[in-house]
Image (cartoon, rainbow, N blue to C red):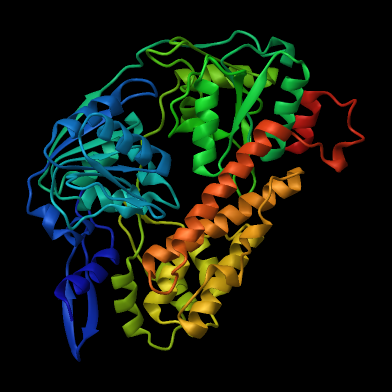
């Protein structure tokens, strides 16, 4: 059995030590013998540990130039890798480098565009290659290392990428945590602080009505229903047309909506968006208008955090754009003081980084518990893993839900693991059903044709809000097929067809947004006399 695999398993199950020491003491029976192993998370990546990396931590608010400076170093390097949290960001960086005559490939969970002779690559952080050496690496939005669901991917990239220079871009709140994590790696670290390049001014009063909307405004809401409602109310005035951006839209659609809004020659001069604008899109926004400071996060309705308010508000005003000076206000008077307070506040320091077991780790653990189902294996692992104060085990609710969906299917451990970590939206019934049908077909024949669950001829421009949501769900299923096609290429042979159908979905959604606009829900038909602010409160 591989020594590295044994080390990996021991490394994730470690107990808290004193000071900066992360001690591991784990006894495992391997090949009828016992091994006493003492390892730490940074030792999972021996290739990176062979280097004395120069780590540059670029920190500052939105629109401070921190990422610009890091990408300049990437562009000047003979080889490099960019890791970002969104496919949109990876696309933007690949496009930027290729335009600068620096050949750059693009690799995400759903796309692989390899450029001949390229020594640079832009990736989503989950795809980060820790087995290839680079002269320069950039990890964007490094504060997401503390994210409950995706933080482990940033931890892996931070500790594992074997680059001579490592540039990290993010918020000041992450500095102390990164310093703690790298204090045992032997890397040389330097922190560079940046200030906002243009002012961000909070308004002294809230917006009274949509008659005060101006060109370049962005109204922020936190549900599709509110986004479409606000779009309708603004456009009803007859003075503005609205582009919209929210998380469930295909990335291609979000990009096109952003371009339409940024193009001063179009009539779409106002943006209505969710917090999806917080990162990944370059937007020429004059003023951010919060419709509310509360959002539903999948569990319950909560107040926006100070970092969230700052991240969204900071999108107003962009250096070198039509609106270099940013403004921020709100619709509800009681939110105004919260915005002023948040913009003045210092964000709390992040305390811990996410970890999650790789397949190799779970495979070793399963050998010690051969009678456990995969779901039970994950459940036990989460329950028994002991971590130091600098790390936490990432939330695996989605993976656990996916594991339950495919629990009874005759799949191998690695196959089951791939299906469970796939980008399925388990809270979307159509997406979840897609995963189940793909897994069932794979388990029966080892071959999954797209036509078994999807008929391309049925795609059409949505005629209602409900049809729009259904088309967004179909996009997710096609996206899932493409992702599985990259992992099981011979078993999902129609991934190119699925990719073209994804593009068609995005075009149809785009056509709905531009031609048909907002459709009123029947359940709101009797609410026409209720004010905008009352409706927002009713929907929270």
Residue that extends furthest to the right in the rendered view of this protein: 526
Q: Nearer the viewer, residue 494 or 325?
A: 494
The quadrant the C terminus occupies is top right
Question: Taking 43 as reference, is 167 above or below it?
Answer: above
Question: Could you say where residue 81 lies in the image, as x and y percent from the top left?
Answer: 22, 44
Question: Taking 119 as reference, is 376 above or below it?
Answer: below
Q: Nearer the viewer, residue 327 or 269?
A: 269
Question: Could you say where residue 281 lies in the image, as x and y percent from the top left?
Answer: 45, 31
Relative to 335, 140 lies left or right: left
Q: Residue at x 75, y 27 (%)?
A: 232
Q: Quadrant of residue 5?
A: bottom left
Relative to 172, 190 lies left or right: left
Residue that extends furthest to the front in the rendered view of this protein: 457
Q: Nearer the viewer, residue 55 or 336?
A: 55
The quadrant the N terminus occupies is bottom left
Task: Tell me, yes or no, if residue 57 can be seen here.
Answer: yes
Question: Could you say where residue 26 lies in the image, as x and y percent from the top left?
Answer: 24, 73
Question: Taking 135 as reference, is 112 above or below it?
Answer: below
Question: Could you say where residue 50 lies in the image, as x and y percent from the top left?
Answer: 7, 54
Q: Nearer the viewer, residue 384 or 479?
A: 479
Relative to 405, 178 lies left or right: left
Q: Residue at x 29, y 78 (%)?
A: 364
């Amino acid at each position: 059995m591989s020594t590295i695999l044994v080390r990996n398993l021991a490394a994730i199950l470690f107990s808290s030590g004193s000071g900066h020491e992360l001690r591991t003491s784990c006894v495992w029976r391997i090949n009828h013998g016992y091994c006493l192993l003492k390892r730490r998370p940074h030792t999972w990546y021996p290739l990176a540990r062979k280097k004395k990396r120069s780590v540059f931590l670029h920190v500052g608010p939105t629109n401070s130039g921190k990422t610009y400076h890091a990408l300049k170093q990437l562009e000047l390097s003979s080889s490099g890798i960019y890791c970002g949290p969104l496919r949109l960001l990876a696309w933007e960086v690949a496009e930027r480098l290729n335009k600068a005559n620096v050949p750059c490939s693009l690799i995400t969970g759903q796309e692989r565009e390899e450029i001949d002779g390229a020594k640079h690559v832009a990736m989503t952080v989950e795809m980060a290659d820790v087995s290839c050496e680079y002269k320069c690496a950039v990890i964007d939005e490094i504060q997401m290392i503390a994210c409950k669901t995706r933080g482990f991917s940033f931890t892996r990239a931070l500790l594992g990428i074997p680059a001579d220079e490592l540039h990290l871009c993010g918020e000041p709140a992450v500095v102390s945590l990164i310093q703690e994590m790298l204090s045992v790696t032997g890397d040389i670290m330097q922190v560079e602080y940046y200030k906002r390049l243009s002012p961000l001014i909070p308004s002294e009063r809230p917006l009274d009505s949509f008659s005060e909307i101006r060109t370049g405004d962005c109204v922020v809401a936190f549900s599709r229903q509110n986004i479409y409602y606000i779009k309708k109310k603004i456009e009803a005035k007859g003075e503005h047309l609205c582009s919209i951006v929210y998380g469930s839209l295909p990335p291609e659609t979000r990009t096109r909506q952003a371009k339409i809004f940024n193009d001063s020659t179009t009539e779409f001069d106002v943006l209505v968006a969710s917090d999806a604008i917080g990162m990944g899109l370059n937007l020429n926004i004059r003023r951010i208008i919060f419709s509310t400071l509360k959002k539903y996060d999948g569990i319950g309705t909560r107040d926006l955090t100070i970092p969230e308010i700052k991240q969204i508000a900071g999108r107003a005003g962009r250096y070198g754009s039509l609106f270099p000076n940013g403004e921020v206000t709100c619709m509800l008077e009681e939110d105004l003081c919260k915005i002023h307070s948040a913009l003045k506040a210092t964000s709390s320091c992040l305390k811990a980084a996410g970890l999650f077991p790789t397949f190799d780790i779970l495979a070793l653990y399963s050998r010690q518990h051969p009678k456990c189902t995969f779901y039970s294996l994950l459940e036990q692992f989460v329950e028994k893993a002991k971590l130091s104060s600098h790390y936490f085990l990432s939330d695996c609710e989605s993976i656990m839900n996916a594991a339950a969906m495919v629990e009874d299917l005759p799949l191998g451990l690695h196959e089951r693991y791939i299906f469970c970590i796939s980008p399925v939206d388990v809270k979307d019934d159509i997406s979840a059903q897609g995963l189940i049908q793909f897994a069932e077909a794979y388990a029966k024949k080892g071959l999954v044709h797209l036509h078994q669950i999807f008929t391309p001829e049925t795609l059409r421009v949505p005629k209602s809000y409900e049809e729009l949501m259904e088309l967004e769900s179909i996009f997710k299923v096609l996206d899932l097929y493409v992702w599985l096609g990259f992992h099981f290429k011979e078993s999902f042979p129609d991934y190119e067809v699925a990719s073209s159908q994804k593009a068609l979905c995005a075009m149809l959604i785009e056509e709905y947004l531009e031609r048909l606009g907002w459709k009123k829900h029947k359940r709101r038909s009797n609410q026409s006399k209720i004010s905008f602010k009352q409706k927002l409160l009713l929907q929270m």
